[in-house]
Amino acid sequence: LDSTRAFAGSLLDDQNELATVSAAHASLQLELLTRANLEPANFGEYVEDLRKALSWAFSLDGDALLGIRLVAAGLPLWNELSLGTESKRNCERALAEYEQIGCTDRTLKLKLVVGLATLNTYLSKESAETIALYRTAIQLARQIGDAAVECRALGALATYQMLPGDDKGAWETVTTMREVAVRANDRSEERRV
């Protein structure tokens, strides 16, 4: 099967169609991941296709924005497969590409920052970096008006602060979370009236 793929790839390359087919493959992977109709039994297949799509998207001939979107959409898959290190590496690369291409989609950035903060909670010894990521997520959520994500990020930050015994910091964070939740609920009630 690998030799067949290699042969087909060389034929596409000879016909100058490899980039077109790779772009279509990456777009299909994004569509599959965003639909979230992935069958658990096939997760291994999806992750291999995702890796190939990312490899192309972040190549010189690729589409960095598509790659960034693929990483954001792939977070649940990597989580299900316990591929935290791979997920973290991809989030870091996607965020670097985000800045490099001057992307302005704050919702996309928020997904990546929340994903990386969550991964750092378990995979990084750099607590200052993890706290900074949660604070960035909270700020982005406020900017786009997503109180639910803001509350989740505040809750995760409070939990992270409690681990080393920062009870005062955790209490302040939980208090802020409560205020955000109350304000969001008040806005929700106003819309119903």
Image: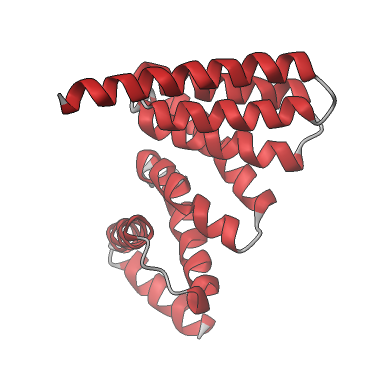
Image-based side of 160 in relation to 63, left or right:
right
Q: Is residue 27 above or below residue 183?
A: below
**Residue toward you, 140 or 164:** 164
Residue at horizontal 39%, vertical 44%? 69
Q: Is residue 193 above or below residue 3?
A: above
The quadrant of the image that shows the C terminus is top left
Q: Is residue 23 above or below residue 151?
A: below
Q: Is residue 121 shown to the viewer in this render?
A: yes
**Residue toward you, 183 or 11:** 183
Q: Quadrant of residue 114?
A: top right
Residue 181 lies, in percent from the top left, at 44, 24
Image-based side of 86 in relation to 49, left or right:
right
Image-based side of 159 in relation to 111, left or right:
right
**Residue toward you, 114 or 61:** 114
**Residue toward you, 168 or 64:** 168
Image-based side of 12 in relation to 58, left or right:
left
Residue at horizontal 35%, vertical 25%? 185
Residue 102 lies, in percent from the top left, at 38, 22
Residue at horizontal 50%, vertical 28%? 151
Q: Which residue reaches farthest right?
A: 164
Residue at horizontal 42%, vertical 50%? 73
Q: Is residue 145 shown to the viewer in this render?
A: no
* Count of numbered tags: 0
